[in-house]
Image (cartoon, rainbow, N blue to C red):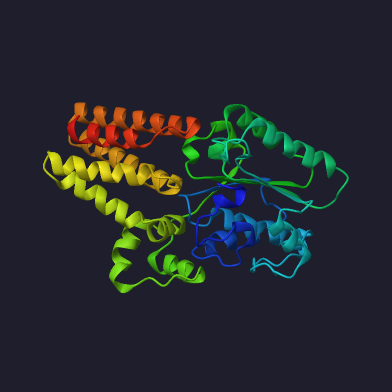
Amino acid sequence: MSGPEDAILDGARPPAETLSLFGHDAALDFLGRAYQSGKSHHAILIEGPEGIGKATLAFRFANHVLAHPDAQSAPDVIAPPDPDSTHFRQVASGASHNLIHLTRPFDEKAGRFKSAITVDEVRRVGRFFGQTSGSDNWRIVIVDTADDLNRNAANAILKMLEEPPKRAMFLVLSHAPGKLLPTIRSRCLPLPLRPLSDPDLEKALKALGFEVSPESRSALFAQAGGSVSEALKLVNYGGLEILNAFESVLSQAPGGQQRQDLIKLAEALSAKGSDTIFAFFADNFIRRIEADARAAALNGDLPAGARMSELSSALKERIDTSVAYNLDRKQIVMNAVESYLFG
């Protein structure tokens, strides 16, 4: 990884630069009407699975507010931003004096993004408000995502949410709002977004220049789960092939061939430059284990449910450790899959 821009998936566009948004008309209508009424909440928690357009929605709304700082004279319809406008160009380039995009910082020494948003990053928000304290403009903070805040950073954000500066707006994104501090959730107005429908997902992919072939359509949409980022990982990073290889390993009888195929899978997931596909596989594997745990519990097999829950927790911990310390992932994959297969 060479810099922060590498956080954007191949084929995707940074949300700040994206003009197209699909599947969230109702949310846009709500935000437009609420803002025009002058009663828009100072902190909005935009919830939903990863890759469905939460950040794009936040930037769309932020551009609307910056383009129409007087709420009562603003249109109640949030139109796509004007790419030629000064505020859009400033927001897209990260040079806006009225908006700060809070994300995990890039570690130049390690050559990768840090695993969390730190309190030092949140202090940037405090300086942002201090430097613009005499301004009558809106000052917008996009927290992307609140799931990435470490405990100190979360507490620092909480203080700002409890005592927001004048004409400050927080757009807080979360893939898993149930895991946030209850006090953060209580200070925000929840705005849940749904995964994209198949037609909207196809439109979003076409806007990025991808045509979905008829032969791959069913498998792609089934695995993507209404997420553009998941679809891109399936198409551009070999995700479909990885999942098919994994299913093949699971379906084989124990023995030499199964182990050989598992080794090939583990090597592919630990190869140089495989960060994105490794994370994709790990997320899918963990979801599968968690689904098995729920199914076992519902069927009354509590020991199996407990074992699957423990395996899920252990795998998450191993993955976090491997990312933090740049450990070899091959053995992590081997051990996790064998634990899943053989207990």
109 to 310, vertically: above or below: below
186 to 76, vertically: above or below: above
Q: Position of residue 108 (x, y in %)?
A: 63, 39
| Residue 162 appears anywhere in the view | no
Asked where in the image residue 234 lies, by quadrant, the reply is: bottom left
Q: Which residue is drawn at the image coordinates 56% and 51% (left, top)?
A: 6
Q: Which residue is drawn at the image coordinates 31% and 73% (left, top)?
A: 214
Q: Closest to the observer: 323 or 139?
A: 323
Q: Position of residue 90 (x, y in %)?
A: 75, 59
| Residue 215 appears anywhere in the view | yes
Q: Closest to the observer: 131 or 25?
A: 131
Q: Position of residue 46 (x, y in %)?
A: 55, 49
Please indicate whether residue 134 sits to the left or right of residue 80 in the image: right
Please indicate whether residue 201 sits to the left or right of residue 87 in the image: left
Q: Which residue is drawn at the image coordinates 60% and 63% (left, top)?
A: 18
Asked where in the image residue 259 lies, by quadrant, the reply is: top left
Q: Quadrant of the C terminus?
A: top left
Q: Which residue is drawn at the image coordinates 24% and 42% (left, top)?
A: 262
Asked where in the image residue 129 lies, by quadrant, the reply is: top right
